[in-house]
Image (cartoon, helix red, strand yellow):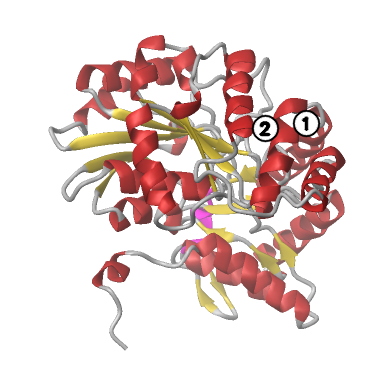
Amino acid sequence: MKLAERLSSVKPSPTLAITAKAKALKAAGVDVIGFGAGEPDFDTPDHIKNAAIEALRAGKTKYTDTPGIPELRDALVEFYKKTEGLEYKRNQTIFSSGGKHSLYNIFMAILSPGDEVIIPTPYWVSYPDMVQLAGGTPVFLNTSEKNGFLFGAAELEKLVTPRTRAIVVNSPSNPSGAVYDEATIKGICDVAIKHGALVIWDEIYKDIYYGEGRLRSLPYYNPEVKPLTLIVSGLSKSHSMTGWRIGWTLGDERIIEGMNIIQGQSTSNPVSFAQYGALAALKEGVTHLPAWVAEFRKRRDALVTAFNQIPGMSCLNPMGAFYVFPNISGWFGKRWEGGVICDSYDAAKFLLESANCAVVPGDPFGAPQNIRLSYALSMEDIGKGIERIRKAVSGLS
């Protein structure tokens, strides 16, 4: 069967594949610790579920406007005005079927063949493939672990060409948990303004932050960058609504309308009754999050401490999201009963087969010396996983 040529340049999502494999092994009776999931293990808050149930019972199950119901879009405008001091209009907002869908629609709306998108490493696995599906060319800004995966304005500017269309910024980062400091952010703003490049500001993990104060949206740091900024976020991580598929974009109304056209010819509106749950979420805010973040912090600390004590591993302390991204290059060249560990794929296979721990290789994130582990699982499972990994590594030769 002949398939489209565009598929030759993209790969299945490795994070979804690892999660599916862990679930399949569990269903087969194997006691697997799943460190692959990119979703909180907490439940969606009750007031959100109740709002969706009420919408269902009220018969709000029909098509809605493609970019979302007006009251939800207005609530988003009010939310950003209240929390960020940013002024948007309804026609500068669009809701899509998750943050991933929002990003895909952006790339489809802004990219033409030959357009370049600068993506700092390590990156979320889907960015490069989405850019290529939209006809663009990903350009990678390589960062180093010794600098905390941060970069300077000079490094960014070296990659700007007349073909540069956009810069993707994900802070806190999936996979590293790195949070860009103010100097990095202001440098991004300066480069974008100087060259007229769009900034795709992916803030899906913004509310899961372990530092002082809170994180802000990009235009807070420099209002002049607002016309060039596309803010992408949603409720999947902050409200544990991954399966609800609600994401949003705020930005230039011409790009929003382009996204609306793309969406109108593909999925149309997000799920109608899920939008009413999202409306309740935006009105209530994130009052539930301090308890979640406190729990995530305990899990993070346990993993970072343990991994920095296991031979061949080193692990930075992530300041946001719910992932650790340890360097495991110290295992390269080591042998186990399944062969020799030569890369992050081998490392993931080693941990799955020797420790019954499912992790995600770093290669698809642009970081071949690392692996990603989610700590969206119980402290009990984290403790078991640490001991299994420690025991498996002790057997390397």
In the image, farthest residue toward the bottom:
1
Counting other residues with Cα less than 10 Å from the Cα at mark 2, is it few (<14), some (14-19), or many (20 or more)?
many
Q: Position of residue 61 (x, y in %)?
A: 69, 54
Give the side of residue 2 with respect to residue 282, left or right.
Answer: left
Q: Residue at x 87, y 54 (%)?
A: 380
Could you tell whether 49 is left or right of 264 in the image?
A: right
**Residue 3 at x, y percent in the picture:** 30, 79
The answer to which image quadrant residue 252 occupies is top left
37 in relation to 209, above or below: below
Q: Residue 117, can we see it?
A: yes
Please provide the residue range marked out in magenta.
327-332
Asked whether the residues under the numbered discs 2 and 1 touch, taking CB atoms below 8 Å apart as contact, a structural biologist would say yes
Residue 285 spot, x, y in % from top left: 74, 26
- The residue shown at (33%, 24%) is 228
Per the image, the residue denoted by label 2 is: 208
Locate the C terminus and report the quarter of the image it occupies.
bottom right
Q: Quadrant of the N terminus?
A: bottom left
Q: Residues within 10 Å of mark 1 (few under 14, many from 20)?
A: some
Under mark 1, the amino acid is: Leu
Q: Position of residue 97 (x, y in %)?
A: 55, 50
Nearest the eye: 101 or 257: 257
Q: Which residue is mark 1?
A: 289
Mark sitting on residue 114? none
User: Tag count in the figure?
Assistant: 2
Q: Earlier in the sequence, mark 2 or mark 1?
A: 2
Residue 132 is inside the magenta segment: no
**Residue 396, visible in the rendered structure:** no
Badge 1 element: helix
